[in-house]
Image (cartoon, rainbow, N blue to C red):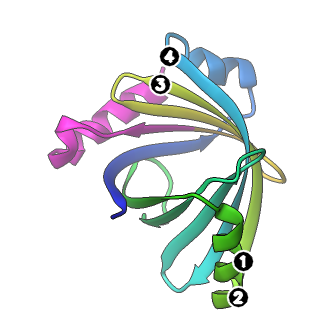
């Protein structure tokens, strides 16, 4: 069964790496990973396979999220894959590839949810904060937390 998450998230371009890392100060650094996200064309829905360099395992990610800036809610379904390459081959034969995104991702553990700093090939740097947890039924509280973090 897929792991389902209801999230409130904020993604923003952030070219000043020093300031981005300052926003993440006090967080536990989990690690840095080179990833390839392959997005598939499945209509209005979103489906990607995430492969991590040096690992056979990966993740299949389905999500629903509006296409607007700022803080937004999303529903994410994750499935761990023991053989990401084999599943990628099957999906490439089944669905058209919409995009392939190569990135380096720094993952941080913050109170309330993860923080990520992405260096995305061709797009630049992106800072992402996600909130999930007991307040999930109150998305308004999640919006307020992320709005406050973004103003720091």
Crowdedness near tag 4: few (<14), some (14–19) or many (≥20) residues, C-alpha within 10 Å: some
Give the label, 2 or 3, closer to the camera: 2
Range of residues picked out in magenta: 128-152
- Prevalent SS, magenta region: helix
Q: Secondary structure at mark 1?
A: helix
Q: What is the spatial separation of the Cα atoms under label 4 and label 1, in whole angstroms?
A: 37 Å
Residue 4 percent location from the top left of the image: 32, 57
Give the label, 4 or 1, closer to the camera: 1
| Nearest to N terminus: mark 3 or mark 4 | 4
Q: What is the spatial separation of the Cα atoms under label 3 and label 4, in whole angstroms?
A: 6 Å
| Residue under the image location 25 percent in, 37 percent down | 133
Tell me the residue that label 3 is attached to: 109
Give the label, 1 or 3, closer to the camera: 1
Labels 2 and 4 touching (C-beta < 8 A): no
| Residue under the image location 71 percent in, 47 percent down | 55
Give the label, 2 or 4, closer to the camera: 2
Labels 1 and 2 touching (C-beta < 8 A): yes
The quadrant holding residue 51 is bottom right
Image vertical order of residue 111 relative to residue 4, above or below: above
Q: What is the spatial separation of the Cα atoms under label 2 and label 3, in whole angstroms?
A: 36 Å
Tell me the residue that label 4 is attached to: 27
Tell me the residue that label 1 is attached to: 89
| Residue under the image location 64 percent in, 80 percent down | 91
Residue 112 percent location from the top left of the image: 33, 29
Q: What is the spatial separation of the Cα atoms under label 2 and label 4, in whole angstroms?
A: 41 Å
Residue extending furthest toward the right: 122
| Nearest to N terminus: mark 4 or mark 1 | 4
- Is 47 situated left or right of 118 in this image? left
Residue 61 percent location from the top left of the image: 51, 62
Q: What is the spatial separation of the Cα atoms under label 1 and label 3, in whole angstroms?
A: 32 Å
Labels 3 and 4 touching (C-beta < 8 A): yes
- Is 27 situated left or right of 32 in this image? left
């Amino acid at each position: 069964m897929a792991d389902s998450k209801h999230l409130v998230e904020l993604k923003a371009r952030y070219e000043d790496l020093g300031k981005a890392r300052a926003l993440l100060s006090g967080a536990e650094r989990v690690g840095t990973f080179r990833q390839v996200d392959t997005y598939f064309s499945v209509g209005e829905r979103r489906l990607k396979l995430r492969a991590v360099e040096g690992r056979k395992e990966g993740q299949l990610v389905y999500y629903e999220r509006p296409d607007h800036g700022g803080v937004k809610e999303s529903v994410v379904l994750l499935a761990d894959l023991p053989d990401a390459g084999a599943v990628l081959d099957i999906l490439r034969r089944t669905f058209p590839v919409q995009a392939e995104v190569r990135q380096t991702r720094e993952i941080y553990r913050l109170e309330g949810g993860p923080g990520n700093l992405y260096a995305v090939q061709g797009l630049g740097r992106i800072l992402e904060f996600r909130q999930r947890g007991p307040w999930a039924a109150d998305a308004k509280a999640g919006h307020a937390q992320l709005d406050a973090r973004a103003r720091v």
